Each structure stands twice: as structure tokens, then as C-alpha cells.
């Protein structure tokens, strides 16, 4: 009987903006944890990157140490200790300009002659969390797209929005987007990479912790391009595979968030058309999501039980006659002191 009465009351409660937002937020929470094809592809893409990072860095270590043998690095460090700043030529870096030469006959047009420079294939590879996944030599938006997606759970735990770039895809910069980007960067400890050597970076926290795994000693402290490091074609392809895997994380994250955004839009449209709260509750149940309609009704944004007559009356009474006379204040003070003595 009580259940029927409650349902009858629910059917009379009109939908409002606050109810719509509560239902929508509850749906988004469920959608983000639902095991869908899009979410599974995103998680698999991140796992693939973890595997390739280790392999690619091992290859990079071999390539860099061929170019800058350990004995040469130690000699330079020893000379710096002896002669000081003028011989400070060894630095740690996590980004490298790798290059390999195409074999004769590998060119696209065999009838044309190519110089040695034309046959060289070069590309910038940054092992940092915010390293570019595209053709840019240094950090660009693809670096942030990867970092936010890869560290999604950590950013969510800090009340940040790691999906902001995916949600705002192809949209111009705006205050909402900028606010969340700045919050994400701060939470990850990112303060933009140096265009010279990584040991000049000011990053802290999660970014520094991630990047610290991938530093190698190089000789020469200028831009990456001026110290291009030779490698084989196979080694070069390993570095390309890591970049492609990072790009795939961005792509899979974008597809997953696009799916959720489409669902959110459909929910918004439907909830806006509903006149009664019971319709929203019924929708959620049809979607397989349990929602406590009593809690929706009971609490408003201030947390007060506004539909309880006693609480509502008390709240309304408290909105008037708020100015107390001197005698009322003295009486309240005396009552407080007497209660304190009793206790």
C-alpha cells in the first residue's frame, strides 16, 4: 500500500533542471564504467603502449650508446670536473632525432637520382609523457591528448576532466576548455618541455616520475636536430611503432568519449521533454541503471529534505524574523551558559 502511494506521489512530481542533472550525471557515471567495445579498445590500446614503451626504449638505449659510448661520456664528465663550465657538454635527454638512410633502389622513383641527404629519413621521437605523437618536433596537442588519456584514472581521482580535449575536439579555444586544460597540466605536474635538453624541464609530480624512466646521456646540449643520431631502418620502425601506438590511444579514447557524448545528448533531449520525474526514473530502469527516486526527491542542492513538511516549514520560518533584540540575545546566552554548567 505504501509503495503504491509513493509511486502515485512520484508520478505527480514535476521534472526540473536539478532532477535532470542528477539523472544525467548518474547515467554518465554508469556509461564510463560500462564494458563496451569502445572502452575495451581504449584499455587495450593503453596496454599496448606500455609494452612498446619498454621495447622501444631498450632499442633507443642501444642506438644512443652507439653514438655516445659510455667511455666518452665518462671522459667528458671527468673533463668538466677538471676544467669546469666550458666543458659542460654532457646532458640527459628523453627526446632524440633519429635517422636512417634508404638503401639504393628504395627510393620511390628509381629513374631519378638522389643525393645522400635525400635518402636520409629523419624524425623526432620524444619518450616523455607529453611527447608529440605527430610530426611536430616538440610538444603539441597530441602530447596532451595522449597524456590525459593515458593518465585518465589519476586525473579523475584529482577531480579533473581528462576527457576535455576529446569533448572539445575541433572546437576553438574557450574559457571552459582552457580551465580544464590548466587543471590537468597542474595535476600532472606539467609545465611545458624545454626545446633544448630535458634536464631543463620544470615538470614535477606524475610527469617527472614518468619521464625519469627514459633519460639517456647525450653529448652536446643544443637542439635535437643538430645532433641527429643514426640508426638502422628496423630500429627506426620500432620508434615509429611506439608513436603509432600512442596515436592509437588518442584515437580509441576519442571514439569512446564520442560515444558517451552522443549518449549524453540523447539523454538530455529525452529528459528535457519529460514533464514528470517518474518518466526519468523509468528511463533509467529501462537502461538497466538502478536509481533511488526517493533520494532524488528528498534532497535538493542545499542537502535539505525539502519535501518533508517539518523540514520545509522550519526552513521557511528561518527565513524571517532574523533580527534579534538585545533581550533575546541575553536570554539565549544565559540559556547556553546554564546548559554548560549542567553538562
Image (cartoon, rainbow, N blue to C red):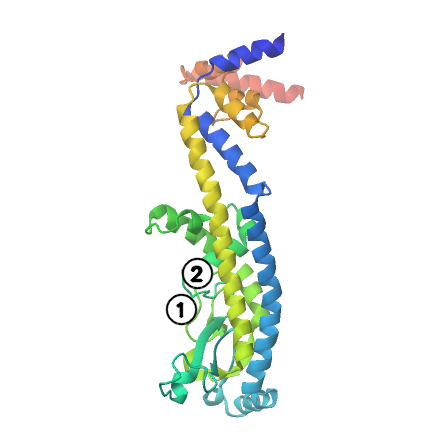
Upstream in sequence: badge 2 or badge 1: 1
**Which residue occupies the extreme front position in the image?**
111
Residue at x 36%, y 51% (from the top left corner)? 170
**82 lies above or below 130:** below
Residue 52 image point, x, y percent: 59, 66
Residue 304: which disc? none
Question: Residue 192: which quarter of the image?
Answer: bottom left
Per the image, the residue denoted by label 1 is: 136
How far separated are the C-alphas under marks 2 and 1?
Answer: 9 Å
> Pointer 2 and pointer 1: residues touching (CB < 8 Å)?
yes
Per the image, the residue denoted by label 2 is: 142
Q: Quadrant of the N terminus?
A: top right
Residue at x 53%, y 33% (from the top left corner)? 26
Residue 193 image point, x, y percent: 44, 67
In this view of the protein, which residue sits in the foreground, 329 or 64? Answer: 64
> Number of marks in the image?
2
**Which residue occupies the extreme right position in the image?**
343
Q: Secondary structure at mark 2?
A: helix
- For label 2, count other residues whose C-alpha is less than 10 Å away and answer few (under 14), some (14-19) or many (20+): many
- For label 1, count other residues whose C-alpha is less than 10 Å away and answer few (under 14), some (14-19) or many (20+): some
**309 lies above or below 100:** above
Residue at x 46%, y 75% (from the top left corner)? 197
In this view of the protein, which residue sits in the foreground, 322 or 187? Answer: 187
**129 lies above or below 68:** above
Residue at x 48%, y 56% (from the top left corner)? 250
**275 lies above or below 220:** above
Q: Secondary structure at mark 1?
A: loop
Amino acid at each position: 500500500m505504501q509503495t503504491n502511494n509513493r509511486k502515485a506521489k512520484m508520478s505527480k512530481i514535476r521534472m526540473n533542471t536539478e532532477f535532470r542533472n542528477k539523472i544525467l550525471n548518474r547515467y554518465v557515471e554508469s556509461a564510463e564504467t560500462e564494458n563496451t567495445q569502445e572502452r575495451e579498445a581504449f584499455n587495450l590500446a593503453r596496454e599496448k603502449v606500455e609494452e612498446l614503451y619498454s621495447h622501444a626504449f631498450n632499442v633507443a638505449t642501444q642506438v644512443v650508446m652507439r653514438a655516445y659510448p659510455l667511455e666518452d661520456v665518462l671522459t667528458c664528465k671527468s673533463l668538466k670536473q677538471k676544467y669546469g663550465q666550458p666543458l659542460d657538454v654532457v646532458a640527459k635527454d628523453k627526446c632524440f632525432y633519429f635517422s636512417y638512410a634508404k638503401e639504393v633502389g628504395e627510393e620511390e622513383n628509381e629513374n631519378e637520382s638522389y643525393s645522400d641527404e635525400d635518402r636520409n629519413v629523419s624524425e623526432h621521437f620524444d619518450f616523455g609523457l607529453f611527447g608529440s605523437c605527430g610530426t611536430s618536433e616538440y610538444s603539441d596537442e597530441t602530447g596532451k591528448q595522449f597524456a590525459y588519456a593515458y593518465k585518465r584514472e589519476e586525473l579523475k581521482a584529482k577531480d579533473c576532466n581528462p576527457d576535455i580535449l576529446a569533448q572539445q575536439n575541433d572546437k576553438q579555444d574557450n574559457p571552459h576548455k582552457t580551465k580544464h586544460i590548466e587543471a590537468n597540466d597542474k595535476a600532472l605536474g606539467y609545465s611545458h618541455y624545454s626545446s633544448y635538453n630535458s634536464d631543463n624541464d620544470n615538470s614535477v609530480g606524475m610527469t617527472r616520475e614518468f619521464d625519469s624512466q627514459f633519460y639517456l646521456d647525450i653529448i652536446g646540449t643544443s637542439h635535437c636536430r643538430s645532433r641527429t643520431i643514426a640508426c638502422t631502418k628496423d630500429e627506426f620502425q620500432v620508434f615509429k611503432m611506439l608513436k603509432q601506438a600512442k596515436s592509437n590511444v588518442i584515437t580509441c579514447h576519442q571514439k569512446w568519449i564520442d560515444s558517451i557524448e552522443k549518449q549524453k545528448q540523447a539523454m538530455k533531449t529525452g529528459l528535457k521533454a519529460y514533464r514528470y520525474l517518474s518518466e526519468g526514473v523509468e528511463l533509467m530502469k529501462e537502461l538497466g541503471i538502478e536509481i533511488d527516486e526517493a533520494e532524488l526527491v528528498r534532497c535538493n542542492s542545499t542537502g535539505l529534505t525539502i519535501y518533508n513538511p517539518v523540514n520545509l516549514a522550519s526552513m521557511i520560518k528561518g527565513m524571517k524574523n532574523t533580527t534579534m533584540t538585545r533581550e533575546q540575545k541575553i536570554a539565549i546566552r544565559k540559556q547556553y551558559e546554564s546548559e554548560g554548567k549542567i553538562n
